[in-house]
Image: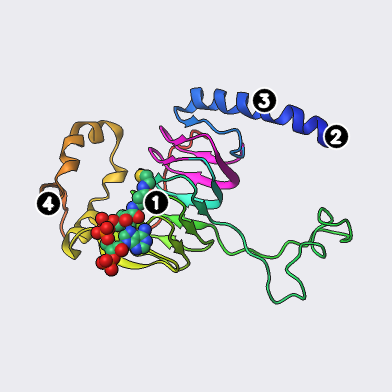
């Protein structure tokens, strides 16, 4: 009875909750299947048909398309483009046990276990800023995808991806780099994804010419090294 009530009440409640949060925080969650604990950044979009767990952190100005997209646990940077059908950060099972079935670890599966004993998980997947993920890609848990990388359609990413690399296939292999090494280094120093909204708006036309952009904004190789993980997003919380 409790489960039936929950299944009737939960979807409209979820819908209203996200509709209110969208207004409050200036983002657009169109799916009812995004955990209320997920942290969604400023002006980010989550389209219909995306399912996401409480471990999702989506940076400002990023979008995730559906249908068929599932994000279990991932820290995703700003200005990322994630296509439909992608699966990110799914958990694994402890393969050293007699069985990979959940029956000995959770009473919810078969009703035999006395207590839930969840195995330790790999850390959440980390996806940098300005990453483009093609349709139906699978990015395993614990993997780090560098800033500016591109994941090809249907790739299965089981190892870390360097910044600005283009990878594809199963397992994903390096196809090429988006830019020559000196431009990659310059973009990682510039960190345009940290610029405030007014600066981005003022300079938006300059994003169309990479050579001119790095010449103009590169602070030079003596600038301090920057960490590779996204931080400081405006989740409005
Ligand atoms: C990965 C990708 C960005 C590469 O684009 P590209 O650099 O123009 O690629 P090319 O067509 O020049 O192909 C370069 C090489 O990569 C291979 N390749 C291209 N896409 C691939 C993919 N998804 N998986 C595996 N290999 C791929 C090509 O076969 C080619 O190999 P070869 O040099 O041995 O012949 C692109 O193919 C892709 O998958 N885009 C995603 C599209 C998408 O999902 N859009 C969703 C809506 S935004």
Query: Residue 74's x, y, as percent?
Result: 51, 52
Instruction: Identify the mark nearer the N-term, 2 or 4.
Output: 2
Query: Residue 133's x, y, as percent?
Result: 39, 51
What separation in Å lies between label 1 and label 4 (alpha carbons)? Answer: 25 Å
Name which quarter of the figure residue 186 lies in.
bottom left
**Label 2 environment density (alpha carbons within 10 Å; few <14, some 14–19, many ≥20):** few
SS at mark 3 in the image: helix
Ligand 1 within 8 Å of disc 4? The answer is no
Mark in the foreground, 2 or 1: 1
Mark in the foreground, 1 or 4: 1
Which dot marks residue 12? 3
SS at mark 2 in the image: helix
- Which residue position holds label 2? 2
Question: Do the CB atoms of the residues marked 4 and 3 lie less than 8 Å apart?
Answer: no
| 119 horizontally vs 146: left or right | right
Which dot marks residue 211? 4
What separation in Å lies between label 3 and label 2 (alpha carbons)? Answer: 16 Å
| 176 horizontally vs 38: left or right | left
Q: Residue at x 22, y 59 (%)?
A: 184
Q: For the magenta stretch, what is the residue range?
A: 36-65
Question: Do the CB atoms of the residues marked 1 and 4 lie less than 8 Å apart?
Answer: no
- Which residue position holds label 1? 134
Name which quarter of the figure residue 37 lies in.
top right
Closer to the camera, 197 or 142? 142
Query: Residue 136's x, y, as percent?
Result: 47, 52
Ligand 1 within 8 Å of disc 1? The answer is yes
Query: Residue 175's x, y, as percent?
Result: 30, 66
Q: How many marks?
A: 4
């Amino acid at each position: 009875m409790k489960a039936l009530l929950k299944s009737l009440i939960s979807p409209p409640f979820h819908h209203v909750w996200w509709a209110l949060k969208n207004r409050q925080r200036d983002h657009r969650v169109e799916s009812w299947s995004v955990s209320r604990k997920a942290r969604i950044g400023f002006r980010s979009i989550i389209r219909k048909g995306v399912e996401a767990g409480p471990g999702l952190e989506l940076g400002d100005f990023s979008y995730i398309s559906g249908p068929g997209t599932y994000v279990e646990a991932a820290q995703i940077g700003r200005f990322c483009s994630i296509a439909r059908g992608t699966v990110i950060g799914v958990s694994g099972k402890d393969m050293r046990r007699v069985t990979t079935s959940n029956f000995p670890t959770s009473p919810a599966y078969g009703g035999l276990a006395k207590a839930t004993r969840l195995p330790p998980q790999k850390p959440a997947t980390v996806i940098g800023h300005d990453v483009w993920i093609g349709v139906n890609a699978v990015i395993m848990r614990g993997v780090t995808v560098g800033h500016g990388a591109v994941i090809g359609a249907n790739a299965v990413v089981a190892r870390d991806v360097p910044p600005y690399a283009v990878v594809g296939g199963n397992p994903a292999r390096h196809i090429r780099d988006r830019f020559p090494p000196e431009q990659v280094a310059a973009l990682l120093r510039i960190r345009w994804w940290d610029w405030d909204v007014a600066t981005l708006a003022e300079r938006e036309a300059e994003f169309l010419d990479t050579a001119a952009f790095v010449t103009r904004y590169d602070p030079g190789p003596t600038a301090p090294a920057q960490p590779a993980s996204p931080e400081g997003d405006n989740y409005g919380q």
